[in-house]
Structure formats: structure tokens, C-alpha cells
Image (cartoon, helix red, strand yellow):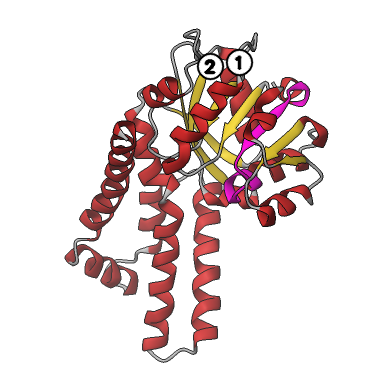
Amino acid sequence: MASQLEKSKLGFIGGGNMAGAIIGGLVAKGINKQNIIVSEPWEVNRDKIKATGVRTTASNAEASQDADLLVLAVKPQVTKGVCQELAGAWTGRTSLPLIVSIAAGITLASLKEWLKLTDGRTPHIIRVMPNTPALLGEGASGLYASDDVSQEEKDLTAALLGSVSKVTEWVDREELIDVVTGLSGSGPAYFFAMVEHLIESGIGLGLSREQATRLAKQTCFGAGKMLVESSDEPAQLRINVTSPKGTTEAALKSFDASGFKETVNKAVKAAADRGKELGETLAKS
């Protein structure tokens, strides 16, 4: 399907960090820059995207006009207005683009309603939840497609996300996209918070900030690499580091006593619930 991606005209509505990551991945994969057009209202962002060699515009209608696949990379709060603008611009258009939405929480039902043309037609839609490591080509993405999406369209979208994601997981129920949001979409922030606290703990016990930062960063990088490259499950890797009655066991017992598992469960659920709440609230607006 990479060959189909190379032939496709790709439009982006919004040129923020996530759109920029995907575009950067596409360019790195050798996709023709002239087949990519991005609409972005803010000149500073538009100039940043333009520097990659792709075409840019301030017009959403222009960016979508000839697109085979159109990425909605806008904030949830403005998605309705953008969709309605696009639907109005497509009046009389014979074929509609495949829509790939990365707007957190916005449901297929809302997208279909907002993108419906006056003649009753709606485009095929796929919801995607990527994450910020996509900026380094190390992303993880969850995907969910409406029933009318073809296998070819799914493959095209997987190829698009595969340009910046090492993992692309299709879910079979739409509500699971909110779980993906809570797990991998927001997950990098949980990881960064953990590293922050490791650094501060090291400083509190006598290390300099520079020492604690270097040790924490490399420890987490090395552990992450082991996690990805090892055939062992995370639980087994943890066991491998934990000697009976040793230092690691003492630390893990402290985690358990503080309700670490429950804290993580609550955090992931809070993010997932917020995604659902956001979609429900904006659907009524």
C-alpha cells in the first residue's frame, strides 16, 4: 500500500505539531512533496511547514479540494466549524476524500453529521489517535474505521500513520479509541512526569541536577529499549531486576504500599473518560 500512498494527493487541515510530525515522516519516506498540501491559519506555523517543501495555504477549502485523503489535525473545539466549512466547499464534488481525524474525543457520529453534504452524502471516516513520539518516528497509534471504509482505505491510512508510528493498532469498537487516548495518546506525559520525579528524588538525596538528569534519562531510555527489543514480558523484565530482599524489591514494595497500580489505573481511566466527555459535550454544541 506504500505505492498507493505515493500516488495519493494528501491534504492536511491544521499544521500543528502532530500534522508536522506526519508530514515530516511522509517526506522522509520519499513521498512527493507536491502531493501534500496543508492549510494553517497561523503564518508562523504555515512558514514552518512550508520549509519542508510541501505546499501550504490559509484556505481549508483549497487544501481539501483535490485530496484523496484528508487529515483533520485540528483541536476538538474547532472541529465542528471546520467540518461544516469543508462540507459546504464540496457541494457538487463527484468524489469525496477519505477523512482521517486525529481530533481527540470527536465521534464518528458527530463527524458524519458535520461533514454531511446537502445531497446527503458523507465521506468515509477513520478516527486515529497518534502520540507525540511520532515527532521522532517512534509513535504509537490507535485506529478505528466506520463500517463503510474499505480495506484499501484502511491500508492507505495504516501506511500514512506507519510513516511516523512503530505501532499501529486497529480497535474493533469506537469507545476503545478513548482507551488508546488514555494509554498511549496521553502516555508520554505520564512517562515524563515519572522522570521528573526520579530527577527530583536524586537531587533530594544529594546528586546534582545535572547528574540526576543524565542518570534518569539514560536509565529510562535503556529500560525502554530493553522493553521493545526483549522477547520477555514487562513483568518478567521487572522480576529480572528484582533480587529477593534487595534494593529494587524495597522500592517496589514502597510503590505497592502507595497504591501505585491503582494510581496508574485511575490516571488512564481519567484521560479516557475525559476524551469521551469531550466528544459528548462538543456533539451537543
Judge whether residue 186 can be spotted in this image.
yes
Find the distance from the CA under tag 2 to the CA under tag 1.
Answer: 6 Å
Q: The residue tagged with tag 1: helix, strand or loop?
A: loop
Considering depth in this image, is 23 or 72 the residue closer to the camera?
72
Along the horizontal axis of the image, is 77 left or right of 2?
Answer: left
Say above or below: 265 vs 2: below
User: In x, y percent, where is residue 113?
Assistant: 41, 21
Labels 2 and 1 touching (C-beta < 8 A): yes
Along the horizontal axis of the image, is 49 left or right of 191?
Answer: right
On-image quarter of the N terminus:
top right
Considering depth in this image, is 254 or 144 the residue closer to the camera?
144
User: In x, y percent, where is residue 207?
Assistant: 46, 89
Question: What range of the chain is rendered magenta?
Answer: 6-20
Q: The residue tagged with tag 2: helix, strand or loop?
A: loop
In this view, the residue farthest toward the bottom is 206
Residue 123, label in figure = 2
Say above or below: 8 vs 187: above
Residue 96, label in figure = 1
On-image quarter of the C terminus:
top left
User: In x, y percent, where is residue 83?
Assistant: 50, 29
Say above or below: 125 vs 284: above
**Disc 1 residue type (three-letter):** Leu
Considering depth in this image, is 38 or 170 the residue closer to the camera?
38
